Amino acid sequence: MSRRRPVVTIDGPAGAGKSTVSRRIAERLGFTYLDTGALYRTVALAAVEDPEVGIADTDRLGRLARDLDIRFGDGGTRVLLGGRDVTAEIRSPEISQAASKVSAVPAVREGLLDLQRRLGADGGVVVEGRDVGSVVFPDAEVKFYLTADVACRAQRRVDQLRESGVEVDFEATRREIEERDARDAGRAVAPLRRPEGAIEVDSGPLTAEQVIESMVAVVRSREGS
Ligand code: DC
């Protein structure tokens, strides 16, 4: 497959700063932003809301993932489920945990694969997730693995929620992130890991702007080569 513009993938654990960084890199490069975590979150929301679908009902979950009408608006920052704006709802702690559970179901991952590949097929896209450089776009032109230690990620999540008016406990947030890390990295299908060929970036000691600058520079140098 030859694309005129690159696919840039950014994988990494919860709270490493992927969303901020991915969105701003996409803006800087004039690329589309594709938040694959939002797709898993939307499937989780639909499953939680549907009394017919249990979290253990893997066949139904798979069908749900394949058939849902999920669209992005506003440069990839708003999420629409059957036309309903669910951008805020899918960020709640309840849906975060449910998303981590449904994303471990192979039929759900399979059900979302086509949609993700279609959305990135033309290139000129920054794709954020857990397996986007390893499974979804193994042929991506530029791959990053963005990480930071767990305390740093927990603190960032607390600050981020506080900014949006939600107070959460640091220790509880840290435990929740550890649980999600264990589940995302320990699952049998597409576990979280650094994709082959990905450049690892530790966001701990860096500002978001520093991370963005260095990643944009890498993409530009690859585009020019
Ligand atoms: O990045 P996020 O926190 O919005 O992702 C929500 C959940 O979805 C997370 O627990 C892991 C899962 N996920 C995944 O398994 N694969 C992806 N490509 C993206 C997210």
Image (cartoon, rainbow, N blue to C red):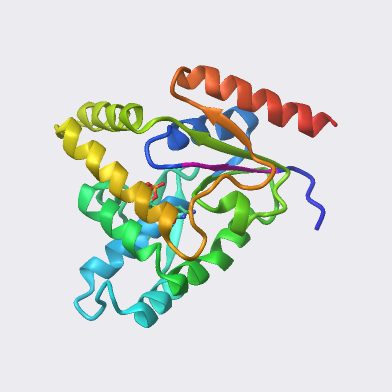
Magenta span of residues: 7-12
Residue 143 x/y as whole percent: 65, 41
Q: Nearer the viewer, residue 179 or 165?
A: 179
Q: Which secondary structure is most common in the magenta stretch? A: strand
Residue 191 x/y as whole percent: 49, 56
Q: Nearer the viewer, residue 210 or 114?
A: 210
Residue 207 x/y as whole percent: 46, 17
Residue visible at 61% across and 49% down? 133
Magenta run includes residue 9: yes
**Quadrant where the image shows the C terminus:** top right
Q: Is residue 89 above or below residue 218?
A: below
Residue visible at 59% across and 20% down? 213
**Quadrant where the image shows the N terminus:** bottom right
Identify the image quadrant of residue 95. bottom left
Q: Is residue 73 left or right of residue 225?
A: left
Q: Is residue 45 left or right of residue 140?
A: left
